[in-house]
Amino acid sequence: MDAQRKDLLRRLMALEFTAIELNLYLDTHPDDHKALADYNAISMELRAVKMEYEKLYGPLVHYGYSPSPGAWRWIDEPWPWEIMF
C-alpha cells in the first residue's frame, strides 16, 4: 500500500478525533467562540481531506455520502478499515 494513502488515512483519523473532542467540549461549553471557530476550521479541513482521499482511493462511507463518479468504486479493496498501519 502506498505511503500517501496511509498518510491521508492518518490525517483523517486525527481530524475526526479532534472534531469529536471539540464537539463533546462544545456540548458543555456552547458559548466558547474559540472552540467553535476551531471546530468549524477542523470540519472544513476534514471535509477537504475526505474529498481528496475519495478522489484518489474511492469512498469512505456509502448511502448517499460518497458519490461515485464514473465506475462504482465501493467494491475496490482494501477498504479503509482493512488497512494495517
Image (cartoon, rainbow, N blue to C red):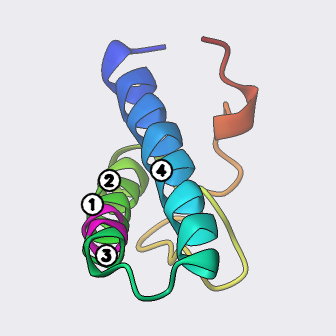
> Mark 4 or 1 closer to N-term?
4
Proximity of marks 1 and 2: CB atoms separated by less than 8 Å? yes
Task: Name the spot of residue 52 as percent of width and height, x first.
Answer: 29, 53
Name the residue that disc number 2 marks. Answer: 49
Magenta stretch? Answer: 38-42
Crowding around mark 4 (Cα neighbors within 10 Å: few <14, some 14 to 19, many 20+) is some
The disc placed on residue 45 is 1
Indicate the amino acid at tag 2. Answer: Val
Task: Name the spot of residue 72 as percent of width and height, x first.
Answer: 59, 65
Q: Is residue 73 left or right of residue 34?
A: right
State which mark lies toward you, 4 or 2: 4
Determine whether the residue tagged by mark 1 lies in a helix, strand or loop. helix
Indicate the amino acid at tag 4. Answer: Thr
Disc 1 from disc 3: Cα separation: 9 Å
Question: Closer to the camera, 41 or 35?
Answer: 35
Name the residue that disc number 3 marks. Answer: 40
Question: Closer to the camera, 55 or 69?
Answer: 55
Proximity of marks 1 and 3: CB atoms separated by less than 8 Å? no
The residue depicted at 63 percent of the width and 79 percent of the height is 27
Q: Quadrant of residue 46?
A: bottom left
Disc 4 from disc 3: Cα separation: 11 Å
> Mark 4 or 3 closer to N-term?
4
Indicate the amino acid at tag 3. Answer: Asn
Task: Name the spot of residue 22 as percent of width and height, x first.
Answer: 50, 63
Question: Closer to the camera, 7 or 27?
Answer: 27
